[in-house]
Amino acid sequence: MSRYSRQVLFDPIGPQGQAALGASRVLLVGCGALGSHLAEFCARAGVGTLTIVDRDIVEPGNLQRQGLFTEADAARALPKAVAAEAHLRAINTDVQVTGVVEDFTFRNAEWLAKDASIILDGTDNFETRFLINDLAVKTGKPWVYAGCVSSRATCMPVTPGRSACLRCMLEDQPAAGGENCDTVGVIMPAVLQAVAWASVVTLKILTGNESALFKKMYVSDLWTGERQILEAGTPRADCPCCGKREFPWLEGNRASRAAVLCGRDSVQITPEGTFDFEAARSNIRKAAKITTENEYLIRAEYEGLTLTLYRTGRALVHGTQDEARARAMMGRLT
């Protein structure tokens, strides 16, 4: 029996739709709660190429809601993109899976998306979502906005020029300090609801069933049973992105080099220019207490803070929201 026989028997997909899936190229941004499940869906559905971009490592606190990952991944502090690639290759060898251990930014977004058929949102912050929206509208690529927090799930398909984009619905990214998974938590049913919506939208787009898309933003609270549906059928003529073709996130005008990660008591620092990881690793070994080290990163404790340094030079300083203190620690150690 064919691996995809039950999917092919579904009349709206059929052999032609399955062939289209096999020729598709998916870019997944983020591989946490949403992204890990979306990645597994893509692999099992039989997309041709799947590129996963994620900046974080697997930690024990991820395992409650993030599919694909195991206690062994957390013990090794593997980057999520690396762990996901390995597990997905074991699930379906027909799918070309590539894990990219990077922060998705205005500097690499267009290059990472250049061959993509669709962009999937597995992120946990609106700055990256507005970057994806700029990228999708500029290049004409469809993307799927999805989100979950507490017991609420959200999803909206964006087909540039044919449906509303994220900026049509939200003029600007919400101010920092709102609810997120690190402050109010999230339950698995909310994750799976958002994944279910995003997955079926992805199937419709990649199998040539765009006419079956719901051009709406769905928001559902699985705990209370409340649901909100916002119409998203037509691009706003005065939308800064769709109508005026303004792309401030993609042009880097809305990006910050040091970012306080909301709810995580951490600061992310991105280096300027080239970075000598081996020299930095050597310095850290001499000055700090090493807690984790592998081919992808080094983690160390120093002056009451924890530094996670990736090969690219991107660093997370845990234990503070003070950017100046984080940069000072980074400077002393590297």
Image (spheres, rainbow, N blue to C red):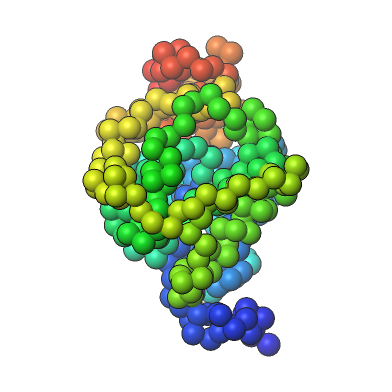
Identity of the residue drawn at 38% across and 56% down: 234
- 150 vs 40: above or below: above
- 10 vs 169: above or below: below
Judged left or right of residue 168, residue 19 is right
Residue 88 location, x and y as percent?
59, 62
The answer to whether residue 194 is seen in the rendering is: yes
The answer to whether residue 75 is seen in the rendering is: no
Q: What is the tally of numbered marks visible in this picture? A: 0
Residue 21 location, x and y as percent?
49, 74
Judged left or right of residue 156, residue 168 is left
Identity of the residue drawn at 45% across and 53% down: 232
Residue 119 location, x and y as percent?
43, 57
- 331 vs 104: above or below: above
Q: Quadrant of residue 186 in the image?
A: top right
Identity of the residue drawn at 35% across and 53% down: 235
On-image quarter of the C terminus? top left
On-image quarter of the N terminus? bottom right
- 74 vs 112: above or below: above
Identity of the residue drawn at 48% across and 41% down: 55
